[in-house]
Image (tube, rainbow, N blue to C red):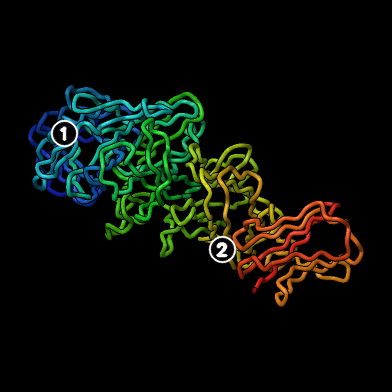
Amino acid sequence: MKKTYIQIFILFFVLSAAYAQLSVRNNAYIFVNDEVVFVEDDVNLEEADATIYLRNEAQLVQGSGTTGNSGIGELSVYQRGTVHNFAYNYWSSPVGNVLSNDNTNRNFSPTSNLYGVTGLTTSNAASLITGYDGSSSPLEIAQYWLWKYNPGTVYSEWDYVGSTGDVASGYGFTMKGSTGSLTQLYDFRGKPNTGTIGTSVLNAQFTLVGNPYPSALDTVDYIHDATNSGLITGTLYFWEQDLTALSHVLNNYIGGYATYTISSDGMIESFVPAVFHTVNQDGTNGTDTGTSTSGKAVHRYIPVGQGFMIEGTGAGTTFTRNSHREYYKQSGVNSEFFRTTGDDTDTQQVTGTINELTYDENGYQIVGSEYKRFRLNIDFDQHHTRQLLHNFHSSATNGFDYGLESNNSNPNPADAYFILEDMAYITQAHNFDVDLKIPLVVVLDEAMPLTLKIHDVQNFEDQPIYLHDKETDVYYDLDEVDFEVNLEAGEYTDRFEITFKDGSDVLGITEFDTNEFTILQNNNVSQLTIKNPNSVDVKSVTLYDALGKRVMQEVNLNTSTRYDFPTKSLSDGLYVVNVTLANKQTINKKIIVAN
């Protein structure tokens, strides 16, 4: 087939242009403002002064052509950072160097491809400095903080890029921001990436990758690509730092990874914000310090320049492809560079047919009626919060559900997670059944109080959701009350579960007050009395306070028709009496102590 080349000398505005192939020659340029240029095959920027400028969320999308871009001219596209000089953004370059003229993607070079903006079409090459702190104008980037990670399991496997290294297309890199600025504008200039781009993964190891194109990347296409789905967990991990930590010292860093996955039909996305922690000298998680409150979120369409981690489930090569690309504005509701929600107000502009997701005032996706979901917020001593998300859909199985679940590969010292077959989950999915019991694990590195609250409950109608404390055998209706407990340090793997039945007790406490067995609190004489007229064999009597702390336990009781226990030393408040019989039946009753 004869190839058709379009030679453009000067074109100030391109509005939704489409080309089979696109050639820009000599000192000509294309200026694209707030729109998309679609090229089915290749882009040829033949000479060094041939340029394409993408401005105001303009993008370049390429189709199924296999020729590959060529030339030594440059595409210029802007992206803003979201951190200051003490914190990292994870990046992935949409362009590579122009050191030679061929039809392959070229490596990104910080000295060749990063520019500081001086005008609408003018930029100066960024200076790569040897100090620790970058500056905004003129743009100076501290080369010490340029690193890549592909792939690895420990901190020592980060690879230094600096001013002389480079990053292959498809991979990500770290870069700290500028002194005094949270919105540093960068100009990525170079040969635009296109086509199928491979990145390596290994089983149970992480690789820093990202969106390698000067257009949005559709997470549905990327995560559910037939090759990728066999090699990664399906969860994307996005790094965020606490911007109040103003230090370059590693063990003063405070940050963590948010998680994101999306179903194959694109109709339900699962985002959970980061739990912040310090970083030990070996790169492992240190002390938990808080939870992200920035409002940052991840959505379906990953914008230009965004980097993220993936976790391998086998050894092989994952791919981004032109078929994963979509023109979707970063300011649209379904896209966001990992930054504060609502920074932009422009409406999105899309090509093709896209299922728009909707969100409530808290930024949570409103799911369709065929789904149910809820979130748990577990507060650790009002210090930090672990959020867990649970999805319910008829397609969910008893095994791992790719695109509906996210695992917790590296739990924090004080953490909580769902669990199935020894895998820890931040996001879990089931086919809803009222008889379902969902184990909840709590891990503590020191004694502390916990509070568990339910949040973002959707499509449960009148169906209650309970937290069952199996040690006290008390069911807490989470729609009515928060669960509070004091726990010692340790790993609680079999104490807590989420259920949808409570043993037919409205408050989740089994009342037992008949002629055969009576539990009562006599505050006139500060005494707990248990009447046992039929001399049933009692194994133990245990008393718990409202936080679940055991305050009394009596065992090896002689068979008697009555037991009396003093309560004068107890503080006023709510308590739960647990009576365990020899036949393993348990009887619980709530009492009020008022001395």
Q: Is residue 522 or residue 183 the one in the foreground? A: 522
Q: How crowded is mark 1: few (under 14 residues within 10 Å), some or many (20 or more)?
A: few
Which residue sits furthest bottom? Answer: 524
Note whether 284 is above or below 496 in the view shown.
above
Residue at figure coordinates x 46%, y 36% from the top left: 225
Question: What type is the residue that disc 2 sits on?
Answer: Asp
x, y (%) of residue 450? 53, 55
Whether residue 6 is visible, yes or no, is no
Q: Distance between the residues labelled 1 and 2?
A: 50 Å
x, y (%) of residue 147? 28, 30
Q: Is residue 578 or residue 30 the one in the foreground? A: 578
Q: Is residue 122 or residue 12 the one in the foreground? A: 122
Note whether 423 is above or below 358 in the view shown.
above
Residue at figure coordinates x 52%, y 52% from the top left: 448
SS under mark 2:
loop
Point out which mark residue 8 bears.
none
Residue linked to disc 2: 482
Report how many numbered discs are placed on residues in the image. Answer: 2
Whether residue 165 is visible, yes or no, is yes
Residue linked to disc 1: 131
For the N terminus, give its image quadrant.
top left
x, y (%) of residue 248? 25, 38
x, y (%) of residue 554? 75, 55
Q: Residue 112 occupies which quadrant of the picture?
A: top left
